[in-house]
Image (spheres, helix red, strand yellow):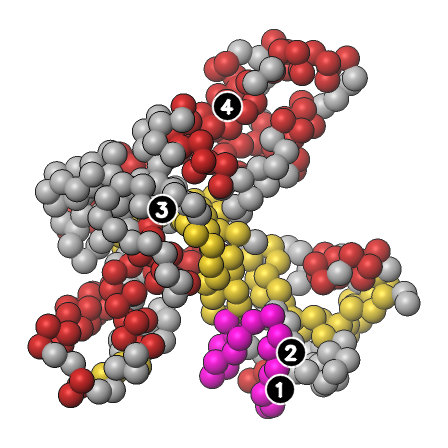
Amino acid sequence: MEIGVVGKPNVGKSTFFTAITTADAQIANYPFTTIEPNRGVGYIRSKCPHTELGKPCNPRNSLCHDGTRLIPVEIIDVAGLVPGAHEGKGLGNKFLDDLRQASALIHIIDASGSTDAEGNPVAVGSYDPLNDIKFLENEMDYWIFGILTSNWRRISKTAENMGKKPETMLFEKLTGLGIGEHQIHLAIAHMELPERPSTWTDEHILTISRAIRKVSKLMIIAANKADKAPEENLKRLTDLKDYIVIPTSAEYELALRRAAKAGLIEYEYGASDFKILKPEALNSAQKKALDKIREFLDKFGSTGVQKVLEEATFRLLDLIAVYPVEDETHWTDHNGNVLPDAYLVPRGSTAKDLAYKVHTDLGDNFIRAIDARTGRVIGHDHELKDGDVIKIVARV
């Protein structure tokens, strides 16, 4: 699974990326600092079942800290997007191509209103950040529209002669964008479209493009620079309907993680406070900065960075964490490792879906599964719950 960090230049995308992944992305105060996409790994938190077992776990594909399983999520930070990107303005085409496989998008906007539409610095509060939400959606809509309309008449007539369904035609046109045929079916299911796709107008295809983007490129908004944003801006953003909006300060999160790494403070990702470990090592400017960060944490509950990633994973994508094991009695793999793997799967996934997630052969040869907590045998269509520990039984 891949989550994209998107937005116009100079809104704090690279700072957010560096904070959430503790990677070293290039950070500067001018447009197009990021040219090649930065890739890294962030971690979402889930309660580890080993606390019920009474013995420590041996994570293999994740981490565990004090009973909290840290499950990796791939993050990609791409070039900044400006109006007209779908026409190639700025680094637009590259930006959009880099997002082909993203399951969800974290849209970083400058809640302080201190960057204009092109990403240039302006006075705080002089630009309306709400403009950026529609602009990004519009660029993505026209990106999909451009892909669909390329040679549409010829391709659609050929497909009609072959008896292909419209959703199959659309799926084949959008191959490589990480969009499933079921998502396309969901997008167009209730549309009143002409029966023959070759007669669809540009207006029809643009409407289809918008619907496909809504179901396939889910988006959460990080209202960044909330530490300097006018209260009116934050209220208007968080009051938006149909959007998950989280006040965020990527700069504060990055400062906390770096201070923790240096051993100056004790700080857990997403925490509402931190503990100063070496006050004597801090100068007056550092102490003042930490006081400001603490005020922000008191007001918002966290810097928002970790919360954005977890809301994107658990709420926007509606994923759950499940733990496959080979020994349902001891919750181990064949080497005796306790709860070695944690997998993120869509809510509603079945035991057989998990088998395929672990390995294609397990899915193909699935016989049954066992709920390790209860010892109960469950079938292929049993719906999994968050935190389930499951043994897959397959033909050898």
Q: CA distance from mark 2 to mark 3?
A: 38 Å
Residue 49 image offset from top left, x and y in percent: 59, 79
| Residue to which mark 1 is pinned | 53
| Label 1 Cα crowd, 10 Å radius (few <14 / some 14-19 / many 20+) | some
- Residue 377 image position (x, y, % from top left): 80, 71
Q: Comparing marks 2 and 3, which lies closer to the viewer?
A: 3
For this rendering, which residue is in front, 79 or 145?
79
Left or right side of 73 for 358 = right
Compare residues 151 and 36 and report the one nearer the observer: 36
Say whether residue 196 is magenta: no
Q: Nearer the viewer, mark 4 or mark 3?
A: 3
Residue drawn at point x = 49 percent, y = 77 percent:
68
Residue with the mark numbered 2 = 339
Asked whether the beta carbons under mark 3 and mark 1 sit within 8 Å of each other, the answer is no
The mark nearer the N terminus, 2 or 4, is: 4
Query: What's the residue type where badge 3 is placed?
Result: Thr
**Which residue is the extreme one toward the bottom?**
54
Q: Nearer the viewer, mark 3 or mark 1?
A: 3
User: Which residue is under mark 4?
Assistant: 145
Q: Label 1 vs label 4: CA separation?
A: 52 Å
**Which image quarter is the N terminus in?**
bottom right
Q: Which residues are magenta?
A: 52-70
Q: CA distance from mark 2 to mark 1?
A: 10 Å
Q: Position of residue 195 (x, y in %)?
A: 66, 14
